[in-house]
Amino acid sequence: MVLPVEPEFEQALAELQNSLKSFLAANPEYEKALEIVQIPERVLQFRVVWEDDQGKAQVNRGFRVQYNSALGPYKGGLRLHPSVNLSILKFLGFEQTFKNALTGLSIGGGKGGSDFNPKGKSDGEIRRFCTAFMSELFRHIGKDTDVPAGDIGTGAREIGFLFGAYKKLQNEFVGMLTGKGLSWGGSFIRPEATGYGLIYYVEHMIAKACPEHSLTKPETLVAISGSGNVAQFTALKVIELGATVLSLSDSKGSLIAEKGYTKEFIKEIAQLKLKGGALESLAQTEGYTYHAGKRPWSLIPVIHIALPGATQNEVSKTEAEDLIKAGVRIVAEGSNMGCTEDAIAVFEASRKTGANGVWYAPGKASNCGGVAVSGLEMAQNSQRLAWTTDAVDQKLKSIMAEAYEICLSAGTKWSGEEIKDGVLPSLLSGANVAGFIKVANAMREHGDWW
């Protein structure tokens, strides 16, 4: 059978297959599970016709990939961006399935969105698009079926419009979306969760691999890419702990700090991004240097911790080599599949060299805090209760610690390597194998493979 070319999905699948080699050699019956799990349970594609401010009809493509419900209702974000296509959403839904398994919560995997671009659109146009989008999607989602969330291009404003449209169509107020406003069913810590969770995961990595680069030390230098929700809260947590943040970036370039970012400046960037602004408008800020068209990885002479937080494939092989030259010890993804296959190969080869190697964590492990707190939001909605900030934060810390331990254990057992003194286990293999085993075992018990 000739399948369509889907490069992003094929990359994610190849990464999983490669990580599973040792496990499948010892457990060949799971080959059938791999063959079945890679095909989504359901793919929805529909047109979205909406009215612009001139009264003209505009059309976009809408998607929802309901990938796997073995562990619970489909769960994953809605991405609004011109680059959205079926390959990207299949890759994200596939990754989401195993990421959600690592949280320990009862949630399956899915992803959706549209090639609609919210940038440059009025509030009215975005509201009309969201209403039109939900007028089809509402048939396929629900609190016990499929619970979407925000993603690139889908923030608090869009979630509000989507929720309002669903409420009118179904005549019910239920937790069928996460990332909601605090006054109508949202959770404390949800906006911060992916960034905070990333740092909680990285703290465990640092404690084992390079305690001399603790995030409580100002001399620990951290490079972050992106300047959206994930990057902002990653940076704020690093600064709160005491380390130094040297970079943020967006699609147009990177802004490098000479002495480190401040909390106040990151909050200024957050306001800029809410208005659809670009970092280039801050190019003249004293103490910061703007580099048009460049990502931060090759721009900084010394980096201890690198945290990609923008989008997929944002660290190339050359940039990975530059990071190693800069002295990086930890690379952990805040974005999904933030590193190319070649970049990951560079980091994994470095890890095997021993004491000063790079330890890499894939996004499905290190950035699962966002969906974890979405799962906690679902639990709060089911109880008709709101937990305190501290209660949610403690649960998030516990989930990230457990995810780290699961990845460490599975990586030690199934990476297919002889673990030598000073060589750390592969968290990439650990995350992939642990997530896969949990999903595959549930599918077998449900009769989905035998």
Image (spheres, rainbow, N blue to C red):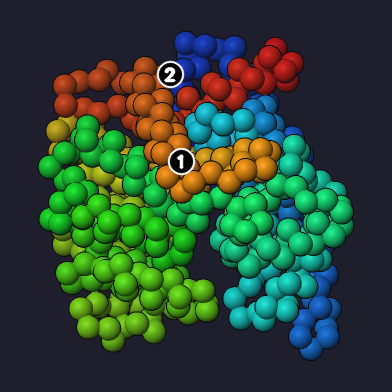
Q: Quadrant of residue 164?
A: bottom right
- Mark 2 is surrounded, within 10 Å at the Cα level, by few (under 14), some (14 to 19) or many (20 or more) other residues, namely some
* Above-or-below relation of 277 to 28: below
Label 2: which residue? Answer: 22
Q: Is residue 337 visible?
A: no
Give the label, 1 or 2, closer to the camera.
Answer: 1
Is 162 on the left or on the right of 224, as rendered? right
Image coordinates for residue 181, horizontal then vertical, percent? 61, 59
Is 340 on the left or on the right of 348, as rendered? right
Q: Earlier in the sequence, mark 1 or mark 2?
A: 2
Identify the element where label 1 is drawn: helix
Q: Give the residue displayed 40% in from the left and 22% down from the top.
A: 410
Label 1: which residue? Answer: 391
Quarter of the figure with the N terminus: top right
Q: Quadrant of residue 366?
A: top left
* Above-or-below relation of 427 to 43: above
* Above-or-below relation of 393 to 431: below
Image coordinates for residue 375, horizontal then vertical, percent? 58, 40
Q: Give the residue displayed 59% in from the left and 36% down from the top.
A: 97
Q: Nearer the viewer, residue 419 or 431?
A: 431
Q: Give the residue displayed 52% in from the left and 79% down from the top.
A: 275
Identify the element where label 2 is drawn: helix
Q: Amino acid at mark 2?
A: Ser
Q: Is residue 172 visible?
A: yes
Q: Amino acid at mark 1?
A: Ala
Is 269 on the left or on the right of 118, as rendered? left
Number of marks in the rendered image: 2
- Mark 1 is surrounded, within 10 Å at the Cα level, by few (under 14), some (14 to 19) or many (20 or more) other residues, namely few
